[in-house]
Amino acid sequence: MADEFDVPESHPRYESLLTRHRIEAGVEKGITSTQGLIAEGRGEAFDYLLGERTTESADEAERVAAASLLLADHPVFSVNGNVAALVPGEIVELAEATGADIEVNLFNRTEERMEAIADHLREHGASEVKGLRADGRIPGLDHERAKVDADGIESADVVVVPLEDGDRAEALDSMGKTEIVIDLNPLSRSAQVAAVPIVDNILRAVPNITAHARELADEPASTLETIVSEFDSDAALAAAEEAIRHGDLQ
Ligand code: ATP
């Protein structure tokens, strides 16, 4: 069933059914964990309340993320099992548009799943996938969860951490990384510690960051710096929470 999905795009729940299908296929392919199914369900509930759309404030955060990635010396995109199942090709495009590295990083790390995800990303066009060497560490986390590549996340200045658990997001924050978090829950610890919290479905967020990066590619550093410095992360989180609590559901 992995590659079969014949729901018409006109179906009112097309995107959410496609998301479920990709996660299910990810589990079958050995790239998504069973805990990933739970994370998916939680995300879906928030997306439903948001109206399954990119809000104005999320779009602004996505533009700020693009500017931040273009300004970075060493940006890295961290990929887990859900991210790999949902947006493999889109990550490759974003990495190309911003010069970011791609690193596989799992909450429940097994060598088989690391390899399966790296293969899956290569099948979708990634030329280099980091994370398998695991010669670096994130201080403050237990052994398996602390593993990263020394020339990847360990030495990154800007990291994109979608659908990340709160402990790791906090530990990366303590290392002084600029974190761009994509998470549909504005109250999650990951979103709360992010320099740039993006409260949007990763399916919509990643292509939109890429589109902004392409549009901003020729702007001078001073323009990008202004975009980043004018961003208010607390206001972005508050706008998302407001949309979830009081938005109009269509
Ligand atoms: P924290 O420890 O940060 O409070 P958590 O325990 O909620 O977070 P997990 O359940 O591990 O963390 O993370 C999954 C997060 O990813 C959830 O907040 C969920 O809303 C979000 N999520 C799931 N699917 C998507 C998606 N497609 N796009 C964006 N976010 C998603």
Image (cartoon, rainbow, N blue to C red):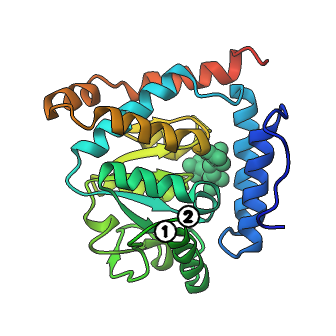
In this rendering, position of residue 68 left or right of residue 43:
left
In this rendering, position of residue 14 left or right of residue 243:
right
Residue at label 1? 105
Disc 1 on helix, strand or loop? loop
- Reply above or below: 206 against 175: above
Quarter-of-image position of residue 247: top right
Q: Position of residue 56 (x, y in %)?
A: 52, 20
The residue positioned 74% from the left and 28% from the top of the image is: 49
The residue positioned 40% from the left and 64% from the top of the image is: 102
- Reply above or below: 223 against 20: above
The residue positioned 25% from the left and 54% from the top of the image is: 157
Amino acid tagged 1: Asn
Mark 1 neighbour class, 10 Å CA radius: few under 14, some 14 to 19, many 20 or more: many
Mark 2 neighbour class, 10 Å CA radius: few under 14, some 14 to 19, many 20 or more: many
Quarter-of-image position of residue 68: top left
Amino acid tagged 2: Asn
Mark 2 CB near ligand 1 (8 Å cut): no
Front residue of 211/194: it is 211
Query: Which one is earlier in the sequence, the residue at label 1 or at label 2?
Result: 2
- Reply above or below: 78 against 240: below
Front residue of 234/224: it is 224
Residue at label 2? 80
Q: Give me the C-alpha separation between circle 1 and circle 2.
A: 5 Å
Quarter-of-image position of residue 204: top right
The reply to whether the C-beta atoms of the residues labelled 1 and 2 are less than 8 Å apart is yes
Front residue of 219/39: it is 219
Disc 2 on helix, strand or loop? loop
